[in-house]
Each structure stands twice: as structure tokens, then as C-alpha cells.
Amino acid sequence: MSDATIDLGAVLTEEEDFGLPQEPHIGQHMTAEVFGQLPKFSRKYELLNGEVIMAPSGMYHDEIVINLGSALRTFAHRNKLGKVYASSVGYRLSEKDLISPDISFVNEARLDGGESPDGYGQFSPDLAVEIVSPNDRAVEIEQKINLYLSHGTTLVWVIHPRQKTATIYRIDGTSQRISENDSFDGEAVLPGFVCKLSDIL
């Protein structure tokens, strides 16, 4: 029998020895291609301008996601308009940007055969919804709004839960701020969809 010993601690701390991917760190730079090959981790990451950012959310945030997402999904499905996606779906908008709106909608005509692809969307959604959390940086929200619109998103809804307000941004450059007693309007993206802000908060 050999007297040789193995330092298991040294072996197990080197994840690459097992071919396991390293979890990205905030501020790390990479391309969308490399980022897109990473598996899902317990925390939600996005790639904004080539830099890894983390998009954590709390329970109230997710409650709003479910409330609005359910209303959008029911309407879109009933009217055969397209697909509604949750925040785990990523959209690769450039070599430096792979982002995940909290809720998104894609018209059925833009999906091959009307079906969702297995991988990331290689386009911008028709509607993107961002729900602002306390830890979100205003500059990153602004960057994401501009990215969506510059890549063809028709409507962007940014919801501020604590202020009970939302801002609607349109591809034509106009914007509109609404209060809790006002309603979202699907406009040309989801014709006929109306949802009062207070109903989802």
C-alpha cells in the first residue's frame, strides 16, 4: 500500500479541475457570447455594456412580477398575440449586452413557428417591464431603457413600487408618468390591454 496522501482541500477548492464554471463576479468584463454560455446560478446576473451586474429582487418585487405577468399572459394567450416571459429570460442585444427584463412580451409573428426558442432571444422584446428595487442603480435602469428602445422595443414600462408610480417609454421618444389610479395601456403592442397600476401593487 502506498504511503502517499492526497490533499483533498487543495483539490476541491479548484473548481476548474472538475470542469465546473466559476460564478461571475460583479464588475467582471466579458462578451455576451461568453456570458451566454454560463449556467444559471442561484443569483440573477445580467451583462450591461460588457460588465456583469447582479439583479437581486425581494418578495414584494416578485409579487408585482406575478400580478402583472399573469394579467399580461392571460390577455396575450386569450387573444393569440404572443408570449409573455419572466425575468429568467435573457435577450442578447449586442456583443456587450445580454439583459433580462422582469417581464417581457414578444409578438407571435416574431417567433419561429410561433414557438419560443430554447436559448436566449437574439432580439429585443416588443414590451419590456422593469420593476425598480431599492438596490437598483438609476444609471443602470436608464442604460437598459435606452438599450431596449434603440434595439426596437416599442414599449418599456418602469414601475416604482414604493412611490406607487410608473413611467412609460415609447420607441417614438415620448414618455408618460402615471400614478396608482392610472392604467397601463397595451397600445399597439397589446391592443385592448388595460391594467390599473394599483391592481398590481
Image: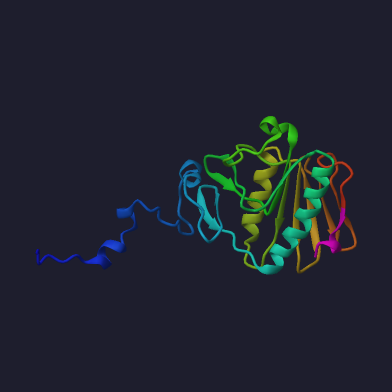
Taking the spot 25% from the left edge, 66% from the top edge, the residue there is 8
Task: Say which quarter of the image contains residue 188.
Answer: top right
Residue 179 location, x and y as percent? Answer: 86, 62
Residue 58 location, x and y as percent? Answer: 65, 68
In the image, residue 2 sits, relative to residue 151, either above or below, namely below
- What range is drawn magenta here? 195-201
> Does the magenta portion include 117?
no
Taking the spot 81% from the left edge, 53% from the top edge, the residue there is 71
Is residue 187 shown left or right of residue 56? right
Taking the spot 52% from the left edge, 61% from the top edge, the residue there is 42
> Does the magenta portion include 199?
yes
Quadrant for the N terminus, please. Answer: bottom left
Q: Nearer the viewer, residue 165 or 70?
A: 70
Q: Nearer the viewer, residue 173 or 117?
A: 117
Is residue 92 shown left or right of residue 19? right
Residue 141 location, x and y as percent? Answer: 66, 55
Is residue 27 shown left or right of residue 108? left
Q: Nearer the viewer, residue 88 or 138?
A: 88
Q: Nearer the viewer, residue 181 or 190?
A: 190
Is residue 111 shown left or right of residue 98? right
